[in-house]
Amino acid sequence: MKKKWCAIGWMAIYLIIALAIQVVMSFQLVGAMYSMLIKNGLFEDATAIESMLEKIQNITQSSGDLILISLLADMVMLACFGTWYYFRENKYTFRPNYKKAFTVKNIFCILGIGFFGQYAIEWLIIGIKVLLPNVFKSYEELAKNFDLSTASPIFMIFVVCLFGPLVEEVVFRGMIYGKLRHNGFSVWVAAIISGIAFGVFHMNWVQGIYAAVFGVVLAYIYEKTQTIWGCTLLHVAFNSSSYIVQYIEEWLTKYESFSLDVFMILFRVISVAVTIALIRQFRSRRLV
Protein backbone atom coordinates (compact mmCIF):
# COMPACT_ATOMS: atom_id res chain seq x y z
CA MET A 1 0.00 0.00 0.00
CA LYS A 2 2.89 2.35 0.77
CA LYS A 3 4.24 1.84 -2.76
CA LYS A 4 0.86 2.72 -4.23
CA TRP A 5 0.57 5.95 -2.26
CA CYS A 6 4.12 6.78 -3.29
CA ALA A 7 3.10 6.27 -6.94
CA ILE A 8 0.07 8.56 -6.46
CA GLY A 9 2.40 11.18 -5.00
CA TRP A 10 4.76 10.96 -7.96
CA MET A 11 1.81 11.16 -10.36
CA ALA A 12 0.70 14.37 -8.65
CA ILE A 13 4.23 15.78 -8.99
CA TYR A 14 4.38 14.89 -12.71
CA LEU A 15 0.96 16.45 -13.34
CA ILE A 16 1.76 19.63 -11.40
CA ILE A 17 5.02 20.06 -13.32
CA ALA A 18 3.25 19.56 -16.67
CA LEU A 19 0.50 22.04 -15.75
CA ALA A 20 3.05 24.53 -14.43
CA ILE A 21 5.00 24.42 -17.68
CA GLN A 22 1.81 25.13 -19.64
CA VAL A 23 0.83 28.04 -17.40
CA VAL A 24 4.32 29.55 -17.31
CA MET A 25 4.68 29.41 -21.09
CA SER A 26 1.24 30.96 -21.53
CA PHE A 27 2.21 33.92 -19.37
CA GLN A 28 5.60 34.50 -20.95
CA LEU A 29 4.04 36.70 -23.61
CA VAL A 30 2.03 38.60 -21.02
CA GLY A 31 5.17 39.16 -18.99
CA ALA A 32 7.04 40.44 -22.03
CA MET A 33 4.26 42.87 -22.88
CA TYR A 34 4.02 44.04 -19.26
CA SER A 35 7.74 44.83 -19.36
CA MET A 36 7.02 47.06 -22.35
CA LEU A 37 4.61 49.06 -20.19
CA ILE A 38 7.36 49.89 -17.74
CA LYS A 39 10.05 50.40 -20.37
CA ASN A 40 7.91 52.89 -22.30
CA GLY A 41 6.93 54.78 -19.17
CA LEU A 42 3.25 53.89 -19.54
CA PHE A 43 2.81 52.34 -16.11
CA GLU A 44 1.10 55.37 -14.61
CA ASP A 45 -1.05 56.17 -17.64
CA ALA A 46 -4.37 54.37 -17.04
CA THR A 47 -5.55 54.79 -20.63
CA ALA A 48 -2.28 53.51 -22.07
CA ILE A 49 -2.30 50.57 -19.66
CA GLU A 50 -5.85 49.67 -20.66
CA SER A 51 -4.92 49.84 -24.34
CA MET A 52 -1.82 47.70 -23.83
CA LEU A 53 -3.71 45.10 -21.80
CA GLU A 54 -6.28 44.86 -24.58
CA LYS A 55 -3.45 44.18 -27.03
CA ILE A 56 -2.06 41.53 -24.71
CA GLN A 57 -5.46 39.83 -24.57
CA ASN A 58 -5.79 39.87 -28.35
CA ILE A 59 -2.33 38.38 -28.82
CA THR A 60 -2.76 35.65 -26.21
CA GLN A 61 -6.10 34.70 -27.76
CA SER A 62 -4.69 34.58 -31.28
CA SER A 63 -4.78 31.08 -32.77
CA GLY A 64 -1.24 31.27 -34.11
CA ASP A 65 0.12 32.39 -30.76
CA LEU A 66 -1.76 29.67 -28.90
CA ILE A 67 -0.25 27.04 -31.17
CA LEU A 68 3.20 28.57 -30.72
CA ILE A 69 2.78 28.62 -26.95
CA SER A 70 1.64 24.98 -27.12
CA LEU A 71 4.73 24.03 -29.12
CA LEU A 72 7.08 25.81 -26.72
CA ALA A 73 5.41 24.15 -23.72
CA ASP A 74 5.68 20.74 -25.41
CA MET A 75 9.37 21.32 -26.12
CA VAL A 76 10.06 22.13 -22.48
CA MET A 77 8.04 19.12 -21.32
CA LEU A 78 9.83 16.78 -23.71
CA ALA A 79 13.22 18.04 -22.54
CA CYS A 80 12.18 17.59 -18.91
CA PHE A 81 10.11 14.40 -18.96
CA GLY A 82 11.88 12.81 -21.93
CA THR A 83 15.22 12.87 -20.12
CA TRP A 84 13.58 11.74 -16.90
CA TYR A 85 11.77 8.88 -18.69
CA TYR A 86 14.92 7.77 -20.53
CA PHE A 87 16.99 7.36 -17.39
CA ARG A 88 14.14 5.81 -15.43
CA GLU A 89 13.45 3.17 -18.10
CA ASN A 90 17.15 2.27 -18.28
CA LYS A 91 16.85 1.01 -14.70
CA TYR A 92 14.53 -1.77 -15.85
CA THR A 93 15.76 -4.86 -17.65
CA PHE A 94 12.55 -5.31 -19.67
CA ARG A 95 12.71 -4.36 -23.34
CA PRO A 96 9.64 -4.46 -25.62
CA ASN A 97 9.41 -6.86 -28.53
CA TYR A 98 8.84 -4.36 -31.35
CA LYS A 99 8.48 -7.05 -34.00
CA LYS A 100 5.63 -8.67 -32.08
CA ALA A 101 4.06 -5.35 -31.06
CA PHE A 102 3.99 -3.85 -34.54
CA THR A 103 2.73 -6.55 -36.81
CA VAL A 104 0.80 -5.39 -39.86
CA LYS A 105 -2.43 -6.40 -38.15
CA ASN A 106 -1.61 -4.45 -34.98
CA ILE A 107 -0.63 -1.32 -36.90
CA PHE A 108 -3.83 -1.50 -38.93
CA CYS A 109 -5.92 -1.90 -35.75
CA ILE A 110 -4.17 0.96 -33.94
CA LEU A 111 -4.62 3.33 -36.88
CA GLY A 112 -8.25 2.25 -37.22
CA ILE A 113 -8.96 2.80 -33.51
CA GLY A 114 -7.43 6.25 -33.76
CA PHE A 115 -9.35 7.24 -36.87
CA PHE A 116 -12.78 5.85 -35.99
CA GLY A 117 -12.35 6.47 -32.26
CA GLN A 118 -12.31 10.22 -32.91
CA TYR A 119 -15.89 9.96 -34.18
CA ALA A 120 -17.06 7.25 -31.78
CA ILE A 121 -16.20 9.57 -28.90
CA GLU A 122 -18.19 12.40 -30.47
CA TRP A 123 -21.33 10.83 -29.00
CA LEU A 124 -19.89 11.75 -25.62
CA ILE A 125 -19.22 15.29 -26.82
CA ILE A 126 -22.79 15.57 -28.17
CA GLY A 127 -24.07 14.46 -24.75
CA ILE A 128 -22.03 17.19 -23.05
CA LYS A 129 -23.39 19.73 -25.55
CA VAL A 130 -26.96 18.79 -24.65
CA LEU A 131 -26.44 18.60 -20.87
CA LEU A 132 -23.92 21.43 -20.42
CA PRO A 133 -24.49 23.95 -23.23
CA ASN A 134 -22.65 26.81 -21.51
CA VAL A 135 -19.59 24.64 -20.89
CA PHE A 136 -19.67 23.45 -24.49
CA LYS A 137 -19.76 27.00 -25.83
CA SER A 138 -16.33 27.78 -24.34
CA TYR A 139 -15.01 24.53 -25.81
CA GLU A 140 -16.22 25.54 -29.28
CA GLU A 141 -14.31 28.82 -29.00
CA LEU A 142 -11.18 26.90 -28.03
CA ALA A 143 -11.61 24.36 -30.85
CA LYS A 144 -11.64 27.14 -33.45
CA ASN A 145 -8.01 27.88 -32.58
CA PHE A 146 -6.97 24.46 -33.87
CA ASP A 147 -8.64 24.66 -37.25
CA LEU A 148 -6.23 24.30 -40.18
CA SER A 149 -7.36 27.67 -41.54
CA THR A 150 -6.14 29.56 -38.47
CA ALA A 151 -2.41 28.95 -39.01
CA SER A 152 0.04 27.29 -41.38
CA PRO A 153 -1.39 23.79 -42.01
CA ILE A 154 2.07 22.19 -41.92
CA PHE A 155 2.91 23.88 -38.62
CA MET A 156 -0.49 23.01 -37.17
CA ILE A 157 -0.26 19.34 -38.18
CA PHE A 158 3.26 19.06 -36.76
CA VAL A 159 2.25 20.50 -33.39
CA VAL A 160 -1.21 18.94 -32.99
CA CYS A 161 -0.78 15.63 -34.79
CA LEU A 162 2.87 14.67 -34.27
CA PHE A 163 4.83 16.51 -31.60
CA GLY A 164 1.99 17.05 -29.13
CA PRO A 165 0.93 13.36 -29.01
CA LEU A 166 4.54 12.21 -28.49
CA VAL A 167 5.05 14.57 -25.55
CA GLU A 168 1.72 13.70 -23.92
CA GLU A 169 2.41 9.97 -24.23
CA VAL A 170 5.82 10.33 -22.60
CA VAL A 171 4.21 12.15 -19.67
CA PHE A 172 0.93 10.31 -19.20
CA ARG A 173 1.58 6.76 -20.35
CA GLY A 174 5.35 6.60 -20.00
CA MET A 175 5.75 8.47 -16.72
CA ILE A 176 2.37 8.38 -14.95
CA TYR A 177 0.82 5.10 -16.11
CA GLY A 178 4.22 3.37 -16.01
CA LYS A 179 4.82 4.58 -12.45
CA LEU A 180 1.42 3.33 -11.31
CA ARG A 181 1.96 -0.09 -12.91
CA HIS A 182 5.46 -0.50 -11.50
CA ASN A 183 4.08 0.22 -8.04
CA GLY A 184 1.41 -2.43 -7.88
CA PHE A 185 -1.68 -0.94 -9.49
CA SER A 186 -3.69 -3.21 -11.78
CA VAL A 187 -4.03 -2.35 -15.46
CA TRP A 188 -7.53 -0.92 -15.27
CA VAL A 189 -7.03 1.04 -12.06
CA ALA A 190 -3.79 2.52 -13.42
CA ALA A 191 -5.50 3.26 -16.74
CA ILE A 192 -8.41 5.07 -15.07
CA ILE A 193 -6.18 7.10 -12.74
CA SER A 194 -3.80 8.11 -15.55
CA GLY A 195 -6.82 8.84 -17.78
CA ILE A 196 -8.26 11.22 -15.18
CA ALA A 197 -4.87 12.94 -14.89
CA PHE A 198 -4.82 13.27 -18.68
CA GLY A 199 -8.26 14.88 -18.56
CA VAL A 200 -7.22 17.34 -15.84
CA PHE A 201 -4.19 18.33 -17.93
CA HIS A 202 -6.46 19.69 -20.69
CA MET A 203 -7.94 22.23 -18.25
CA ASN A 204 -11.45 22.44 -19.71
CA TRP A 205 -14.47 20.28 -19.01
CA VAL A 206 -15.28 19.01 -22.50
CA GLN A 207 -11.74 18.10 -23.50
CA GLY A 208 -11.12 16.83 -19.99
CA ILE A 209 -14.01 14.36 -20.08
CA TYR A 210 -13.27 12.86 -23.49
CA ALA A 211 -9.49 12.95 -22.90
CA ALA A 212 -10.00 10.92 -19.71
CA VAL A 213 -11.95 8.27 -21.67
CA PHE A 214 -9.42 8.29 -24.49
CA GLY A 215 -6.61 8.07 -21.93
CA VAL A 216 -7.94 4.71 -20.76
CA VAL A 217 -7.84 3.40 -24.36
CA LEU A 218 -4.29 4.74 -24.79
CA ALA A 219 -3.20 2.95 -21.61
CA TYR A 220 -4.80 -0.26 -22.89
CA ILE A 221 -2.80 -0.08 -26.13
CA TYR A 222 0.35 0.80 -24.18
CA GLU A 223 -0.18 -2.32 -22.08
CA LYS A 224 -0.87 -4.52 -25.09
CA THR A 225 2.13 -3.37 -27.12
CA GLN A 226 4.37 -2.89 -24.07
CA THR A 227 5.90 0.20 -25.68
CA ILE A 228 5.16 3.88 -25.63
CA TRP A 229 5.29 3.91 -29.44
CA GLY A 230 2.06 1.91 -29.61
CA CYS A 231 -0.03 4.50 -27.77
CA THR A 232 1.83 7.33 -29.53
CA LEU A 233 0.83 5.90 -32.92
CA LEU A 234 -2.78 5.71 -31.70
CA HIS A 235 -2.68 9.28 -30.42
CA VAL A 236 -1.24 10.55 -33.72
CA ALA A 237 -3.98 8.77 -35.67
CA PHE A 238 -6.68 10.11 -33.34
CA ASN A 239 -5.56 13.75 -33.61
CA SER A 240 -4.97 13.51 -37.38
CA SER A 241 -8.35 11.98 -38.17
CA SER A 242 -10.27 15.18 -37.37
CA TYR A 243 -8.40 17.02 -40.12
CA ILE A 244 -8.91 14.17 -42.59
CA VAL A 245 -12.67 14.14 -42.07
CA GLN A 246 -12.71 17.94 -42.19
CA TYR A 247 -11.52 17.71 -45.79
CA ILE A 248 -14.07 14.97 -46.51
CA GLU A 249 -16.87 17.15 -45.12
CA GLU A 250 -15.78 20.13 -47.22
CA TRP A 251 -15.72 17.94 -50.31
CA LEU A 252 -19.18 16.48 -49.60
CA THR A 253 -20.77 19.90 -49.09
CA LYS A 254 -20.12 20.62 -52.77
CA TYR A 255 -22.97 18.22 -53.62
CA GLU A 256 -26.26 20.01 -52.98
CA SER A 257 -28.29 16.81 -52.93
CA PHE A 258 -26.07 15.28 -50.25
CA SER A 259 -27.15 15.46 -46.60
CA LEU A 260 -24.01 15.98 -44.53
CA ASP A 261 -25.89 15.70 -41.22
CA VAL A 262 -27.28 12.28 -42.11
CA PHE A 263 -23.86 11.13 -43.29
CA MET A 264 -22.17 12.23 -40.04
CA ILE A 265 -24.80 10.48 -37.88
CA LEU A 266 -24.32 7.23 -39.81
CA PHE A 267 -20.55 7.66 -39.77
CA ARG A 268 -20.50 8.10 -35.97
CA VAL A 269 -22.69 5.01 -35.48
CA ILE A 270 -20.41 2.94 -37.71
CA SER A 271 -17.36 4.39 -35.93
CA VAL A 272 -18.55 3.07 -32.56
CA ALA A 273 -18.95 -0.45 -33.94
CA VAL A 274 -15.64 -0.40 -35.82
CA THR A 275 -13.71 1.01 -32.85
CA ILE A 276 -15.03 -1.67 -30.49
CA ALA A 277 -14.27 -4.41 -33.02
CA LEU A 278 -10.70 -3.19 -33.53
CA ILE A 279 -10.03 -2.86 -29.80
CA ARG A 280 -11.22 -6.44 -29.34
CA GLN A 281 -8.55 -7.59 -31.79
CA PHE A 282 -6.02 -7.10 -28.98
CA ARG A 283 -7.97 -9.20 -26.45
CA SER A 284 -5.90 -12.36 -27.04
CA ARG A 285 -2.97 -10.74 -25.26
CA ARG A 286 -3.35 -11.19 -21.52
CA LEU A 287 -3.56 -8.11 -19.32
CA VAL A 288 -1.73 -8.66 -16.04
Image (cartoon, rainbow, N blue to C red):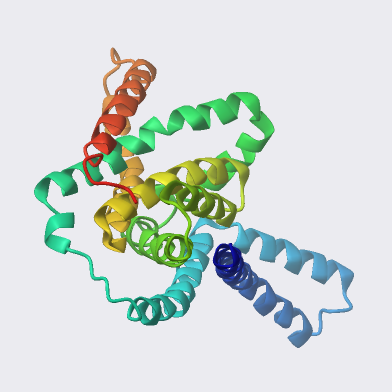
Give the residue displayed 81% in from the left and 70% down from the top.
49
Whether residue 244 appears in this view of the structure is no
Quarter of the picture holding the N terminus: bottom right
Give the residue displayed 87% in from the left and 75% down from the top.
45
Taking depth in this image into account, of 103 and 131 the one nearest to the observer is 103
The single residue placed furthest to the front in the displayed view is 1
Q: Where 288 falls versus 32 (above or below)?
A: above
Whether residue 190 appears in this view of the structure is yes
Q: Where 274 falls versus 115 (above or below)?
A: above
- For residue 83, side relative to residue 274 (left or right): right
Rendered location of residue 82, percent (x, y): 40, 76
Q: Where 81 falls versus 59 (above or below)?
A: below
Rendered location of residue 211, percent (x, y): 49, 46
The single residue placed furthest to the bottom in the displayed view is 39
- For residue 234, side relative to residue 21 (left or right): left
Quadrant location of residue 132?
Answer: top right
The single residue placed furthest to the top in the displayed view is 257
Rendered location of residue 262, percent (x, y): 36, 15
Taking depth in this image into account, of 172 and 133 the one nearest to the observer is 172
- For residue 213, side relative to residue 33 (left or right): left
Q: Where 205 falls versus 256 (above or below)?
A: below
Give the residue displayed 55% in from the left and 55% down from the top.
197
